[in-house]
Amino acid sequence: MYISEIDKLLNQIFPIYRSFTGDGVRRTLKIIKEQIPLNIQDVASGDEIYDWTIPDEWRVKNAFIKNEKGEMIVDFNKNKLHLMVYSIPIEGWFTFDELKENIFTLPEQPDLIPYKTSYFGKRYGFCMTHNNFVEMDPTQKYFVKVDTEFVKGSLTYADLLIKGKTNKELLISTYICHPSLANDNTSGIVLTTFLAKFLLEKENYYSYRFVFAPETLGSIVYINKNYETLKKNVIGGYIVTCVGDKGDFTYLQTRNEDSLVDRITKSVLKELYKINHKILDYKNCWSDERQYNFPGMGLNVGSLMRTKYGAYPEYHTSADDLNLVSSINIQESLDAYIKCLDLFEKNRIYKSNTVCEPYLTKYNMYPTTASCGINASKEKRSFRDTLEILHYCDGEKDLIGISEILNIDISTVISCIEALLENKLISVVSN
């Protein structure tokens, strides 16, 4: 559907150096705004948001480590992951023992550079491959330069509300603060953009609220600025991340674990992906679903991913690059999201309009000839499905509940429900 456009956007925004704050986030949102009509907003450094304070903007000019021969050991300009995010400025000569306390590696993955942050701790740090680290001469001194600055600025986020026939909303949120990570961050930004683009091109029953914000503090800011509206209107939603790898689908449930979004997502995965998917309990959460599901908010927000963050070996390393993800995988993930939202749109509670079983032959919904033998059940299956579904249109059960009780595929239930609605044999009781 959007594969070529997905590929273009993926390659356009992956190289942008994004952090908690700063121009990288603003550049990314400006590019996305070329696709969908985002409302971009800023919250000033120093503003108090619940228990948090918006930090100063962090800007990087350069960062490197050189040995006594002037040879470059670590160079931020070669790989942006080399510098720990929010490192304080520093310059001077250090012994190996002094420096090694500020170097991070992955001994178990010696060829990879880790991703590290220190948003609220005043320190500096470098990240490098463990192989390069062990090659450093412990008898030498090293010249270190971290050319960064902290300035009064803002935390930037954006949203988009696509109005439907009802004010009841589904919240779709993705975080935008990770640099040089393709699956954990960039893939989610790309999918969320094209999911919004898809919904803008059609009429919807529900309204859809899209949020692009830095992880944790960004979602806390968004909740703070929109608390009453979110509490009043949001019936569920998703955190979009890690949707570009080729792993099986994984659904991380809401804190409730039996909310409407849980039931819908599990139904879609069960029908489309059979056994090739995973369902995780809420206690496994570690992204913005924490904020949206927190007891004070309680929005029933899950996360539909491919391989869960932290569960693939490239996670938070230099191997989470454009070789790990593909536009085809993101399109497949987008299709799964579209299936879930389509079921949201169609899931209702229905009630029969007749006192007893209707005369289905009158509506061309009953076979006109009786069959015997081995083919009888096959020929009457459609009728039996319709009649069984009709028996559970009792004003209490929704479409998913009927599917679960009868063990009939969601797609079959939808087809039968549509036929019954067309013939005015049932009516919608509630949404």
Image: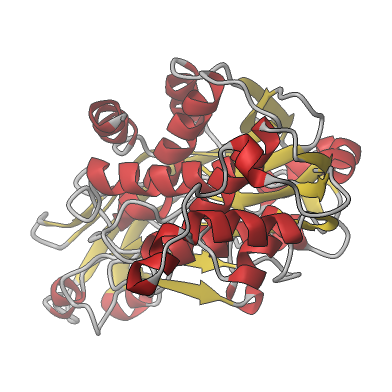
> Which quadrant would residue 379 be assigned to in this image?
bottom left
* 125 versus 334 height, above or below: below
* 107 versus 409 height, above or below: below
Q: Which residue does the image show at 42% across and 62% down from the upper left?
A: 371
> Which quadrant would residue 121 be assigned to in this image?
bottom right
Q: Which residue does the image show at 32% across and 81% down from the upper left?
A: 97
* 120 relative to 129 in the view: left or right: right
* 308 versus 87 height, above or below: below
Foreground residue, 122 or 34?
Answer: 34
* Screen quadrant of the C terminus: top right
Q: Which residue does the image show at 51% across and 53% down from the upper left?
A: 412
Q: Position of residue 242 (x, y in %)?
A: 41, 56
* 396 relative to 342 in the view: left or right: right
Q: Position of residue 114 (x, y in %)?
A: 32, 66
Q: Position of residue 3 (x, y in %)?
A: 26, 33
> Is residue 17 shown to the viewer in this render?
yes
> Is residue 152 shown to the viewer in this render?
no
Foreground residue, 254 or 69?
Answer: 254
Q: Position of residue 39 (x, y in %)?
A: 65, 20
